[in-house]
Image (spheres, rainbow, N blue to C red):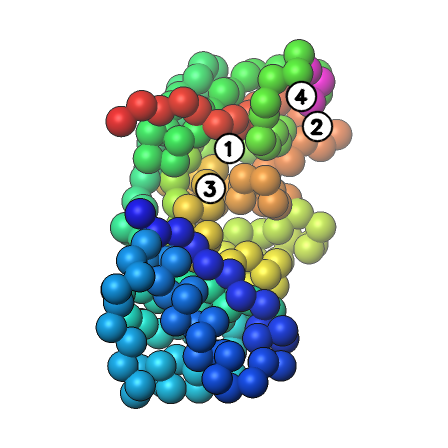
Amino acid sequence: QGTTVRIRHEEFSRLLPALQRRVLKKAIELAAGDDTIDHSWIRTEEALAFMAEAQSGRSMEVPGGLFLEREYDDLIIRAREQELVFCVPLAIPGETVVPAARLAVETLLLDNLPDSGAGGVNYLWQAVFDYDKIPLPLYLRNRRPGDRFCPSGMGGRSKKLQDYFVDEKVPQMRRNAAPLLATEQGVIWIAGMRTDGRFLPGTGTKKMLAVTIRSADVRR
């Protein structure tokens, strides 16, 4: 079974061409888990040219059914990932397991702010919202074309999710798996990153919704 191989672009670019070819071939074999891959001269030279010039977010196919991708300061060689799609309605209050994301979501209705991380539980993310501002139902899902939200701290300005991921330098291969808390109208929280400021508690808040996400042991 193969793995994901990461190469530092700056260090790789300083190598002599002959050594670059050896490193590339070895990285492809490691990523594929197969040391018998046929490396043609043409495809090797195409990959080396890509590694020298490609901008972040660009990718190309290389031998072994793998993809070579420029990810900011790194070059990534990996297998094609199966497209991840999930959208699960959440129990409020209660706990909901999202098997595709290997996550569990706990929701609580509160009169006071919760104690973050209480009890030493391995929580990944937690956010608190004004319950009365949220149009139910709520879902945990991944991104969709055209998703937008109003990041807290930006004065209510709307931003495309794609642009936010680029600005925050979220690797392209991780964007589709990012868990989003959403209503039927749109995204209100990129879990672990930024909430939509329109739904946060304020001076007039009477009831709060605390949403906590943790890893879930999902057996397949």
Disc 2 element: loop
Looking at the image, do the residues carrying marks 4 and 2 touch, with CB atoms under 8 Å apart? Answer: no
Disc 3 element: strand
Disc 1 element: loop
In the depicted view, which residue is nearer to us: 177 or 211? 177
Which residue: 32% across, 39% down? 86
The residue wearing badge 4 is: 117
The residue wearing badge 2 is: 204
Amino acid type for the residue under numbered disc 3: Leu
Q: Nearer the viewer, mark 3 or mark 4?
A: 4
Which residue: 45% across, 14% down? 94
Q: Nearer the viewer, mark 4 or mark 2?
A: 4
The residue wearing badge 1 is: 134
Q: Nearer the viewer, mark 3 or mark 1?
A: 3
Amino acid type for the residue under numbered disc 1: Ile
Q: Quadrant of the C terminus?
A: top left
Span shown in magenta: 114-118
In the depicted view, which residue is nearer to us: 218 or 32? 32
Lower sequence index among marks 3 and 4: 4
Q: Alpha carbon of mark 1 to alpha carbon of mark 4: how far? A: 24 Å
Q: Which mark is residue 180?
A: 3
Q: Is residue 42 visible?
A: yes
What is the magenta segment's predominant secondary structure? Answer: loop
Q: Is residue 188 magenta?
A: no
